[in-house]
Image (tube, rainbow, N blue to C red):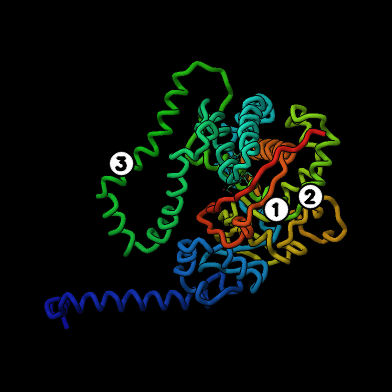
Amino acid sequence: MTTERLLTGTSPMQFLCLGIIGYLTYGIFRALYNIYFHPLSSFPGPKLRAGFYFPFYYDRLTGDYINDWHELHEKYGEVVRIAPHILSTISPDAWRVAPDKDHTRMRRSINHAFSEQALRSQENIITGYITFMISKLHARAQTQTPIDVTRWMNATTFDITGDLAFGEPFGALEADACHSWIENTFAGLKWVRLMAPLRAYPIFGVPIFALLRRWPALEQARKRQFGYLDEKLERRLRSKTDRNDFLRLTSGLLIIAGSETSATCLSGAVYYLLKNPTWITCLLSELRSAFKNESEMSFQSLSHLKVLQAVIQESLRMYPPLPVDMPRMTPPEGATVCGAYIPPHTSISIPHYPAYHSHLNFKDPDTFAPERWLGDEKYADDRRSVLQPFSMGSRNCIGQNLAWAEMRSILARLVWSFEMELLPESEGWDQGQKIYLLWFKPALMVRLRAREVE
Ligand code: HEM
C-alpha cells in the first residue's frame, strides 16, 4: 500500500486509534527496558515505579508522598528506586554526593549577609520582635484566651525576615493576623505541585497551560503577588541606610525559606514539649540556672545551653521543616552509596522525614527523646550524622546560624515566660498532616499562664 492510499483511506478516528496504540506500545516497551535493562535496574523498589513515572508524579499530588516513601524505605531498605531514573536513600553516606561548583560561586557573593558579624548586627532587631511577641502573649495569658501557636510562630518569623530583608515587617504581629501575601504564597504551593506532572505529560500540560494563560484573573493575582514584594523592594532602595541586609537576594523564596521553616520547627518543639512535660521542667531548670532574668538571654549565651540545643535538634528530627527530598545529581564519575555504585547523572535524594524516622538510623524513631543528643547510652547506636535538616554541601542552608539564633531565643523565652496547656482539639496535632513541599500545619491550640517570678 502506498503512503498516499494509506493517508486517503484512513479516517481521523483511525489515525487517533493508531496514535494511541503507538503511544501505548512505546510506553510498554520503554517500561520493560526501564525494569530489566536500565542502569538502575538492580536497585530495589516496586516494579511499577521502576517502569513508569506516573506513580512518582501522582505522589506529588496527594500531599502524602513522604509517608509513602517512608513505607517504601521500611520495606526495601536504605536505597529505593522511586522512579525510572531516580533513587531515594536514607543513608548518611549520601550527603557527600554532588557538590555544585556554579552554585558555590553564586553563594560567595551573598555570604556576607549571613555571616556571624551580620547576625550580631541583626540581634537587636530580632530580639525586638521576640519581645513584642512575648508582650502580646502576656495579654492573651491574662485573659486566658487560647492561642494558635503555629500562627504566632509564623507571624513572628515572617516579621523578622521581612524586616531583615526589606527594612520593614509584614505587620503580622501588630495586626495579630497572617498577612495576605503569606496566605497567598501558601495557597500557591498547593498549585505548584501540579506543575511537574503537567510538564512531564505534555499531552495534558500543553492544553491546560494554554487555558490558564487566557484566564485574566489568574494573571492579575500573579502580578499582585509579585508586585507586593517589588513595592517593598523599591521603598527599601529609596530609603537611605547602611544596614547590611538581605536586599540583594530578596525574593519570595527567601522570605518563605527564612520564616516558615523556623516557625515550623518551633511549633513542633512546643507540641513535643507539651506531650513530654518532663522536658519542659528540664529546660526551665537549665534556663533558671543560667539566667536571672529574660533580658540576659543573648544569642551568645543561649548557644551554650545543652538541653535547649537537644530539644531543638530532636524537634528538627521528629518534624523536619523541609520534610521532603532535595534532589541532587551524581557527578560524571558516578558515586558510591551503601556500597552500591550509582551511575553518573542519576538523580538521588535524601528525603528528610523518612531518613529521620527510619529504625535503620534511630532507635525508637517515633519517640521524642532529646536525650539521644545528650549522650544517653540507650541511643548510642543512633546514626546521628544522618540528621542534616539544613542539608549539606554547596547548596545547604545559608541562613542556618540565623535560624538557630531565632529558634533558641523564641523557645527559651516562651518556656521562661509561660506555663502552656495543650487544648484537647490539638491532641495528635502531628498526625496526618499534608505536605506540599512544606507541612500544611493545622492550628496548634494552647492556653498560656504567665509563670510566677521565683
Ligand atoms: C529551621 C530553619 C531552617 C531549615 C530547616 C532550613 C532548611 C534549608 C535547607 C534543607 C536548604 C537546602 C535546600 C536544597 O537542598 O536545595 C535551605 C536553603 C536555603 N535556606 Fe534555609 N532553612 C531554615 C532557615 C532559614 C533561614 C532563617 C533563612 C534566611 C533568612 C534561610 C535561607 C535559605 C536560603 C536563601 C537557601 C538557599 C541556599 C542556596 O540555594 O544556596 N533558611 N534551607
Which picture quadrant has residue 245? top right
Q: Which residue is mark 3?
A: 220
The residue furthest bottom is 1
Q: CA distance from mark 1 to mark 3?
A: 42 Å
16 lies above or below 363 = below
Q: Residue 149, image x and y in percent?
A: 61, 45
CB within 8 Å, label 2 to label 1: yes
SS at badge 3: helix
266 lies above or below 289 = below
CB within 8 Å, label 2 to label 3: no
Q: Residue 284, image x and y in percent?
A: 80, 41
Mark 1 CB near ligand 1 (8 Å cut)? no
- Identity of the residue drawn at 52% across and 72% down: 50
Badge number at residue 368 = none
Q: CA distance from mark 2 to mark 3?
A: 49 Å
Q: Residue 5, image x and y in percent?
A: 13, 80
- Identity of the residue drawn at 58% across and 41% down: 152
Badge number at residue 279 = 2
Question: What is the three-letter code of the residue carrying label 1?
Answer: Tyr
Question: What is the three-letter code of the residue carrying label 2?
Answer: Trp
Q: Which badge, 2 or 1, comes first in the chain's sequence?
A: 1
SS at badge 2: helix
* Other residues around mark 2 within 10 Å, as few (<14) / some (14–19) / many (≥20): many
Q: Which badge, 2 or 3, comes first in the chain's sequence?
A: 3
